[in-house]
Each structure stands twice: as structure tokens, then as C-alpha cells.
Image: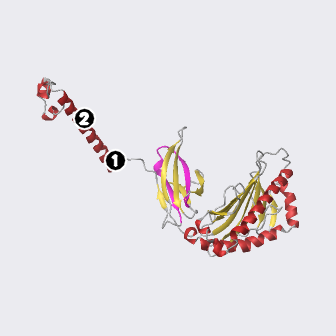
Amino acid sequence: MEQPLLGLSLVGALVLALPETRAGSHSLRYFHAAWTRPELGEPRFVAVGYVDDVEFVRFDSDAPRPRLEPRAAWMEPVVLVDPEYWERNTRVMRRNARTFRVNLETLRGYYNQSQGGVHTLQTLLGCEVSPDGRLQRRFSQFGYDGADFMDLDTVTWTWTAVAPQAEISKRQWEVGNEAERVKAYLEEECVKWVHKYLEMGKEVLTRTVPPSARVTRHTAPDGEVTLRCRAQNFYPSEISLTWLRDGEEQLQDTEFIETRPGGDGTFQKWAVVGVTPGQEGSYSCRVQHEGLAEPLTLKWESPSLSIWTILGFMTGVLLLLNAVLAGVLIWRKKNPDTPSSKEGPEELRNSSSSTRMLP
């Protein structure tokens, strides 16, 4: 993993959702977060590592014994590649935790936040390689209290102060030549470890699982009707869901939910489009994923009775009739003096044979 230490310079960025890796590419990303807890005094620090969109390592300062720990089974034998891996990177994370706590105090001063409260520092650092293994993208960004603070331009290798309060840090980083240190990590160590992790976890990271998908109809309390196209159980995470009306894409009327983990190593995503009641048949959802030989085209189908539903209903009716007849027979045995159908009213005695079967 071999990250550069995050010194007083706060290398990283605010990223509430990790950016998607481009189709066919592979990425290595580290997400760090620290937040103040006035009621406890000590801020909490958490670091999570991702290969592509799969969490593979985690560090939590609140753990009974804070250590960098594996979050993917294929990380267990990493000591065969690097015997000092866990110990060395645990030390890195512990130092990062202390640095983030200092940085939180520094930023509170920048923003004149002397009253305390809950404040958050988040960072993102990583790289992406193309399908043939060459460096394709690098990113080093960070944010404070839910807003971007500083970005690193990886073309010019200069810092951009997104917030006015970041100007002080920007000047310090330029004097300290921080960009060169980050560049060396992103273009050398990061790329090297992407290839190592891909080799170690190739059975999981390079597999392809096609999505299962369906379209459902929903009616809101205010009467608004929407169609939801949901794809799930797919890997890798890159997928395209497109709503079409009579063959025309409906981008402006479509709400997309970001791709998210399914909890079992696969992913899920859905797209919602508003429709006019009665026009549902004009809409179709196109699903594209590298696990599919060709795109799926799905439409909402109104629920209908299948042959099995009909047979099941008929079986239930017959069972009910048998139960009623059995009850009548038992009642007659217990009441032998009850007149039979032959002693009944004239209209029953003279009716058809089928009617005489009535009790």
C-alpha cells in the first residue's frame, strides 16, 4: 500500500461517493475521514482502501487495538508478497490519525470555529490504470465540513485552493514541494500496487457477473406514477440504464440512483422515470453491461393470471366444495330426522337431477 504520510499538508479530498472507474480500467483509492466528537474529546479517524469498487483494507481508530485490517479474503496472503505489509501500514495509519487530529484543529482556526461542534475532514488519494495496465488517471483532493477545500491538478501539478481558507495551506504546500511528493506516489507506488492487488485478487476482481433486471410500477400518495428499472447482482460496477419512450431516450425525465454495493460483492443500480397513467407501454428500459452478450430491453408488464394461478384457484374452490359437502354429510348423520330432498318442497322434487343434488 505504501502511501505517502499525510503531514501538515492534508493530502487528499472530500469525496462522499467514490468516483466510478471507467469501463475496463482498474483503480486503487484510499478514502480517509476524521471528525470531531465534542462529547468524547478525541476525534475519530477511519481509512478505507478500495481496489476498483471493492473494499479491501480498513483502519478505525476506535477499534480496541487499532490496526490496518483485511476486508477481502484475497488480502490474507499479502504477507507472501510483502512480509512487513500489515505492521508497516498500521504504523502509517496511526501516524495519519494523529496528523488528521492536528489538521482538524488547524482548520477550525482557519474558519474561526472557536465554539467547537462537529467538524469533518475527508480525503481521497489514488490512481487508475487502463485495461493494458498504463497509468490513466490520478487524483488527490480533500474537503472540510462537506465542501471542497483543495484539489491537486495532476496535469500541471499545482494546487488549487477551492475555498478562500485554503490559500494558507496552498502557499505552504508550494514551498514544501508537496505536489512532487504526491506525484511520485501516484505515478509509481500506486500503479505498482494496483497490479499486485489485481494479481492477488484476480478471481474476484477480474470476474464478470451479468445483472438481473426488472421493471416495476409505483404510485405515489399524490397520484404520480413512476416506472423503476432496477439492475442487481452484477460485477463489475460499470453499468448503463437508459429509459426510452417510443425508442427516444428520456434523460431529462429520468432520476438515476448511484451504483451501490449489494452487500455480497456485487452491485445494484436503478433508474426512475415519471409516466402518464395509461402510457406505461410506451416506455422501455435498456440495460448494458459487459457481462451481457447484448443489451437487455425491459418493459413493465401488467400483472396477469398465469395458468398455474388459475389451476391453483380452481383447486382451492374444489377443496372448499368438498369441505362443505363433507360437513353436510356429517350434519345429516347427526340429525337423522331431517327431511331428505325427496320430502322437500314441490319445486325441488320436480326439478332437474342436478338441482336434486343440492342439500
Residue 247 visible to the viewer: no
Front one among 32 and 297: 32
Tell me the amino acid under the disc marked 2.
Val
User: Crowdedness of circle 1 by 10 Å Cα count: few (<14), some, many (20+)?
Assistant: few
> Is 290 on the left-hand or right-hand side of 307?
right
* Residue 155, percent from left and from top: 76, 69
Sequence-first tag of 2 and 1: 1
Residue 201: quadrant of the picture: bottom right
**Whether residue 303 is situated above or below residue 23 in the rendered picture:** above
Q: Decide whether residue 272 is among the magenta residues.
A: yes
Question: Considering the numbered disc 2 on the image, is that residue within a helix, a strand or a loop?
Answer: helix
Front one among 307 and 44: 44
Residue at screen point 72% across, 65% down:
90
Question: Considering the numbered disc 1 on the image, is that residue within a helix, a strand or a loop?
Answer: helix
Q: Which mark is residue 192?
A: none
Residue 239 visible to the viewer: yes
Tell me the amino acid under the disc marked 1.
Thr
Q: What stretch is highlighted in magenta?
A: 264-289
Residue 83: quadrant of the picture: bottom right
User: Crowdedness of circle 2 by 10 Å Cα count: few (<14), some, many (20+)?
Assistant: few
- The residue at which mark 1 appears reads as 309
Colour setup of the view: secondary structure
> Is 153 on the left-hand or right-hand side of 85?
right
* Residue 30, percent from left and from top: 70, 63
**Whether residue 314 is situated above or below residue 353 in the rendered picture:** below
Q: Decide whether residue 24 is among the magenta residues.
A: no
Quadrant of the snapshot with the N terminus: bottom right
Residue 335: quadrant of the picture: top left
Give the number of the mark in front: 2 or 1. Answer: 2
Q: Residue 324 carries which label?
A: 2
